[in-house]
Image: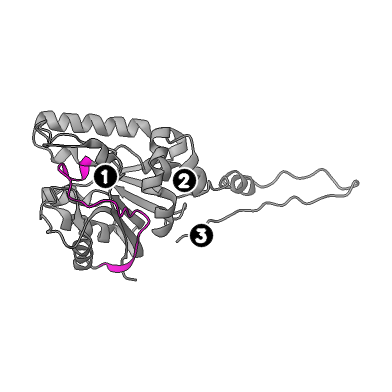
Amino acid sequence: MKTLLLVAVSALALGACAPAKTPAPASVEAAAAAQPAPTMTLAEAVASDARTDVEKARDAWRHPAETLEFFSVGSDDKVVEVWPGGGWYTNILAPWLASGGGTLVAAGFDAASIEDPERRARTEARLAEFKGLYADPKFGAIEHTAFSAASGPLTAEGTADVVLTFRNLHNWMAAGYTEKFFADAYSALKPGGVLGVVEHRLPSTQAQDPKATSGYVHEDYVKALAAAAGFEFVEASEINANPADTADHPFGVWTLAPNSAAADREGKPAEGFDPEKYKSIGESDRMTLKFRKPE
């Protein structure tokens, strides 16, 4: 990844009989003024007040520091976060990257591709709200792009150090454009760049629904999609694993926290449903996969 350039300016001590000190050249003064502030550590970003207590309560299940370290994310990187949603990871990444000279690209929902006027208006409102939340200087200058079946590039081709997606593949499987995500991520990354994927994991003994209506996905299926796009598989981690999750719940992955659904989309509960049983499981079992674009 990139190396942070530090500009050191030293003062020359003059004797008592020496003439008055000549003002430093403007170029030296500008270099000193441009010296970056000390980089916030990842641990400090995770603990910062940019995050709510509700968000921090989920760290035990989502392990943000360990996950970003596993994906080799540096504070001076250009990072594309695809579908940041409510900003759970954005609230960590944005201030951390801003402090280290990095860049965050938030590739969110694509309002322009939505034909229904009411739905498009709702999406535009959500995007405006999201951008407003991150207008504070502490979050840096976030680049906003979009990802959908019809969207353009995630960012300028070959400029990203890392592309990240957290628990989104099942959505794109349902909509039929998962392959596009891997192709777009490959295009965005520099040679040697990293693609990090976290997704709800379906046991290999259970059949994969092509639409992933349960929210769970086979690990081998994700690896195959990445390989087809040209990625090399680097490593898998069990950072976000939960052996207690059997992935066969009445309302799919949404039966578990944080959704804790107790009825289907029509509001119909399952017969004999015991919410306490699912609360005891915790959050879903998740694969954490690291891929690399070949040099």
Label 2 packing within 10 angstroms: few (<14), some (14-19), many (20+)? many
Q: Earlier in the sequence, mark 1 or mark 2?
A: 1
* Residue 241 as seen in the image, left or right of residue 102: left
- Identify the residue position indicated by label 3 in the image: 3
Disc 3 marks a residue whose amino acid type is Thr
Which is more toward the observer, 277 or 17? 277
Q: Quadrant of the N terminus?
A: bottom left
Q: Quadrant of residue 256?
A: top left
- The answer to whether residue 220 is above or below residue 117 is below
Q: In the rendered image, which quarter is residue 281 located in?
A: top left
Q: CA distance from mark 1 to mark 2?
A: 19 Å
- Residue at 75% over, 45% down: 22
Q: Residue at x 49, y 38 (%)?
A: 48
- Give me the residue at 72% from left, 52% from top: 10
Question: Crowding near pointer 3: few (<14 within 10 Å), some, many (20+)?
Answer: few
Q: Which residue is mark 1?
A: 83
First to last magenta residue range: 231-255
Q: Position of residue 129 (x, y in %)?
A: 30, 30
Task: Give the residue pinned by disc 2.
Answer: 96
Question: Which residue extends farthest front?
Answer: 272
Residue at disc 3, secondary structure: loop
Q: Nearer the viewer, mark 3 or mark 2?
A: 2
Mark 1: secondary structure: loop
Question: What's the distance in space between the residues labelled 3 and 2, CA to CA?
Answer: 16 Å
